[in-house]
Image: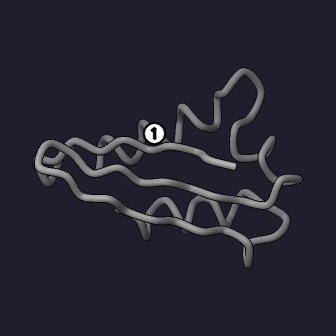
Amino acid sequence: MGELVKVIAEALVDHPESVEVSETVTSASVVIELKVAPEDMGKVIGKQGRIAKALRTVVKAAATRENKHVVVEIVQ
């Protein structure tokens, strides 16, 4: 799941080398943290959070196929 988030995020931003993705696996879910350069934050979030919501929807759909619960967090 982390690779999927990384590929999508790198396609969206101006500085793909600064994209960092970390996965934390707990018993109930998988938490994916996405870090991008500060100037790229708006591109990942989008107007009114639409791109962030779409990213979460895609990851959730992929996770459903593997019977996992995934949370995507965008951090600074």
The residue most toward the top is 48
Residue at the disc numbered 1: 56
Placement of the N terminus among the 4 image quadrants: bottom left
- Position of 52 with respect to 63 (left or right) is right
Q: Nearer the viewer, residue 17 or 66?
A: 17
Q: Quadrant of residue 58?
A: top left
- Position of 1 with respect to 33 (left or right) is left
What's the residue at 68%, 64% (across, down)?
11
Q: Quadrant of residue 13?
A: bottom right
Image spot of residue 56 (x, y percent) = 45, 39
Image spot of residue 60 (x, y percent) = 32, 41
Image spot of residue 46 (x, y percent) = 74, 35
- Position of 51 with respect to 57 (left or right) is right
Image spot of residue 59 (x, y percent) = 38, 48
- Position of 56 with respect to 17 (left or right) is left
Q: Nearer the viewer, residue 58 or 45?
A: 45
Q: What kind of element bears circle 1?
A: helix
Few, some or many residues within 10 Å of mark 1 (<14, 14–19, 20+): some
Q: Quadrant of residue 64?
A: top left
Q: Is residue 6 above or below residue 12?
A: below
What's the residue at 59%, 37% (across, down)?
52
Q: Tag 1: residue type?
A: Arg
Total marks in image = 1
Q: Is residue 60 above or below residue 26?
A: above
Color theme of the render: one colour
What's the residue at 21%, 45% (across, down)?
29
